[in-house]
Amino acid sequence: MEEVVNTGDAAWMLMAASLVLLMTPGLAFFYGGMSRAKSVLNMMMMSFGAMAVIGVVYVLWGWSMSYGSEDIGGIFANPFQHFGLQGAIYDENGEFLAGLGNYPQIIDIGFQVTFAIITTALISGALAERVKFGTWMVFAAIWVTCAYFPLAHMVWGGGLLSGSEDSLAAKLFGTSDDGEGGLVATVSPIDFAGGTVVHINAGIAALVLALVVGKRTGFGRTAFRPHNLPFVMLGAALLWFGWFGFNAGSAFAADGTAGLAWVNTTTATAAAILGWLLTERLRDGKATSLGAASGAVAGLVAITPAAGSLSPVGSIALGVVAGVLSALAVGLKYKFGYDDSLDVVGVHLVSGLWGTVAIGFLGTETGLFYGGDYKQLVIQIVIAVVALVFTAVVTLIIAFALKPLGWRVTEEEEARGIDEGEHAESAYDFATALK
């Protein structure tokens, strides 16, 4: 074990995994605060439900489908190769297998399960206040299997959207020697911590579900105001804190790349807050706390794929544009009539697309603004489009397949409050408080 373990890297990756896991309870507060008082518990339960389902599914077949070596068409790996993590923890001598860094692979498994959890939980924001909890739990298990695990394999596991010799990038721009006797794509796609795998993936799934499930009763006529803005701010703070594990942890070592990702994450997020608040000020005359929290998330989303490829100054530009774009995009649901309840599409899809494509402009090694050519920009657009189409089709099939289970609660339960209808609970006992 002395040969494969750097205890500093191992400790950092365990901490990073814990930080990313914290993001899902943070998301529960963020989404819960944005919901109405009669729906907050259900909104938070959807995040905790995702943690429960995917925490089990990932161990059984999620790691194998994402990172197994038995590739199937460049789309996913054999789910039975490492079913139940067999052969993924120990070698034939009973020693821990080495991971992506100088530490055991079991740490990588722990790190990656947290990504699958938060990605699935993000989708729930588009379904607030109207979806059966049981249907959501079934959807979470099927969607993570059919959409998330394959996309993780395609981008990070050596599949179709990676830089492998059989990838789309290799077919478009050819291959070169990797220096170790193998071949890799001449221009490799860049997705440092999940622009395609996490945010485009969750964002387009949210849009598809919002269209299939339909609008909340009163959408467009009723003001669905956040019931607890301090919850929203707390959730945003926990997300920002956890995001350092998300981005800096994706360096897979306690090194300079992790430090660069940390600084870029902070810088882009701060710039996105300014971009969002400026847009609000010019459009509405006021800068809001909800805007500050949403701007922070937009910046975090945008820098996710680019955290290891930009300079801090480039991160400022990335963040400002993300804040402006998402602040404008959240209003599109009223124009086009889809009920993306808590702005998953406006924030995660829009900023995820921007962050993924912007690498082609702002990447310090291959971006157009730093002397690169068009190839990086082209391949970034290609992986974004493929991710959009793949997940949209998969989600649409799952959404229609689950219709016999029933997506919607009854109109009476929706009017009374989904917390009471689905969980027989209420977040606030007003009757007792008045005694």
Image (cartoon, helix red, strand yellow):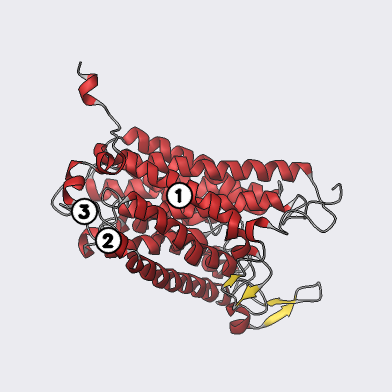
Residue 404 seen in render: yes
Do callouts 1 and 3 mark residues in contact (Cβ within 8 Å)?
no
CA separation in Å, label 1 and label 3: 22 Å
Pick whichever, 182 or 148, lies toward us. 148
Asked whether disc 2 touches disc 1, contact meaning CB atoms under 8 Å apart, the reply is: no
Image location (x, y in percent) of residue 384: 48, 70
- The tag on residue 50 is 1
Q: Is residue 288 visible?
A: no
Residue 225: x percent and y percent? Answer: 23, 42
- Secondary element type, mark 2: helix
Q: Say what amino acid the circle numbered 2 marks.
A: Val
Residue that badge 2 annotates: 213
Classify residue 377 as left or right of residue 4: left
Residue type marked 3: Arg
Q: Is residue 72 above or below residue 214?
A: below
Q: Secondary structure at mark 1?
A: helix
Circle 1: residue type: Ala
Quadrant of the image for the C terminus? top left
Q: Is residue 323 above or below residue 162?
A: above
308 lies left or right of 93: left
Q: Secondary structure at mark 3?
A: loop
Question: Of circles 1 and 3, which is in front?
Answer: 1
Task: Residue at 80% x, 57% y: name it.
Answer: 91
Closer to the N terminus: mark 2 or mark 1?
A: 1
Residue 290 % position (x, y):
32, 41
Residue 216: which numbered mark, if any?
3
Residues at marks 2 and 1, CA–CA distance in whole angstroms: 19 Å
* Sequence-wise first label, 1 or 3: 1
